[in-house]
Amino acid sequence: MSVCATSVLIVEDNPGDVRLIEEMLRETGGPDLRTLNADALAQGLPMLREETVDVVLLDLGLPDSQGLDTLAQTVAAAPLLPIIVLTGRDDEKLAMDSLRNGAQDYLTKGRIDGPVLDRAIRYAIERKRNEEALHAAAEHQRLLLSELDHRVRNNLASLLGLIEISHERYDNVDAFAVSMRQRVQMIATVHTLLSRSNWLPLPLENLIAALLPPGAIDQVEIAGPALQVPVRQMPALGMVLHEFITNSTKYGSLSVRDGELRIQWESVPLEDDVVRITLEWCERGGPKIDQPHHSGVGMSLIDGLVNSELQGEVTMSFPPGGAHHRLVITLDAREVEVNSQRAAILKRYGFSTGRSQTDLHDS
């Protein structure tokens, strides 16, 4: 059989019809083809759960079930399986009703042969897969729009909070404008990353790479185990990393050609599916940096985001050898797990689930 089906369940109570159908299947079937038979619906429904079945050939006139109710019970028991109604009634209305109620095809006994049955099975399987893909696409779109609405609202709230913090600490309008432009650009960068990943978690190294200035990548060493950053925490972590990078670019090791920066992290799983991340930020070869004022906008943002959004703590020190920051945060692993299941569904149907680190540098 030139179809993907290797296991066909025949729900038919007439032994003669069963033999005829099996002969048709053998006519075009391959060595791996397997047929199962149930002579009543009560026998066939459990087989859908207990056996591996690729397609169902269903008679609507069974000893314990008649008509469309037979089809309805079968669809309810196996909504993802393609079902072909194969009955002795040449009834156009029944055929249309069957198709409307979940059957992939309606065939009349006595009017089919092996090639016709083979083609019907192949088409039924393909149509069912297409239907499933369309349902997955629709669900993906619904989730994406809901996520987008939520994230846009959060971004606007973050922006308003940023304006509130910043305007109280800047006397110079130009300096305020530059500060706001840089931080709004960071929010936009994270938003773009999430959009490209279909609002799924992204590797931490991808987030860091997207925030680094283009000319600084050769000065930075990134080390740590594979780590997915949950969507809801990515803007906050992005803002904290942006503040670190901005300070280093202005005053630290990334402000000079020979400066070096090493970013490394480790993760420890805790109870209740919470993962604790310890990130070390170590700079070398840059100019000496004076200890910043804790009343500054950057320090206020870092402290507030780490405490409220990342459920952690941050230690920032500025020894003569270069800045050394230690960031301890918690990530909600349950969100990563839920989204990884969603990512598997999207990948199955060909949706993009993110871009590589190289792609991010090239964009």
Image (cartoon, rainbow, N blue to C red):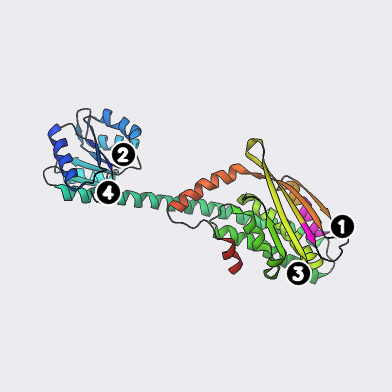
Q: Depth-wise, is mark 1 or mark 2 nearer the camera?
A: 1
Q: Depth-wise, is mark 3 or mark 1 nearer the camera?
A: 1
Could you tell which of marks 3 and 1 lies nearer the N-terminus?
Answer: 3
In percent of width and height, residue 290 lies at: 88, 61
Does the magenta segment cover residue 309? no
Is disc 2 in contact with disc 4, using a CB cutoff of under 8 Å? no
Could you tell which of marks 2 and 3 lies nearer the N-terminus?
Answer: 2
Is disc 3 in contact with disc 1, using a CB cutoff of under 8 Å? no
- The residue type indicated by label 4 comes to Ala
- The residue type indicated by label 2 comes to Val
Would you name the residue on which mark 4 appears?
Answer: 124
Q: Is residue 279 left or right of residue 323?
A: left
Could you tell which of marks 1 and 4 lies nearer the N-terminus?
Answer: 4
Q: Residue at x 79, y 54 (%)?
A: 325
Alpha carbon of mark 3 to alpha carbon of mark 1: how far? 28 Å
Label placed on residue 178: 3
Could you say which quadrant of the image residue 155 lies in?
bottom right
Label placed on residue 319: 1
- The residue type indicated by label 1 comes to Pro
Is disc 1 in contact with disc 4, using a CB cutoff of under 8 Å? no
Q: Residue at x 68, y 55 (%)?
A: 223
User: Where are the magenta residues, as a range?
Assistant: 282-303
In percent of width and height, residue 56 lies at: 26, 40
Does the magenta segment cover residue 284? yes
Alpha carbon of mark 1 to alpha carbon of mark 4: how far? 70 Å
In this orientation, which residue lies closer to the viewer: 240 or 270? 270
In this orientation, which residue lies closer to the viewer: 332 or 268? 268
Q: Report how many numbered discs are placed on residues in the image.
A: 4
Would you name the residue on which mark 2 appears?
Answer: 53
Could you tell which of marks 2 and 4 lies nearer the N-terminus?
Answer: 2
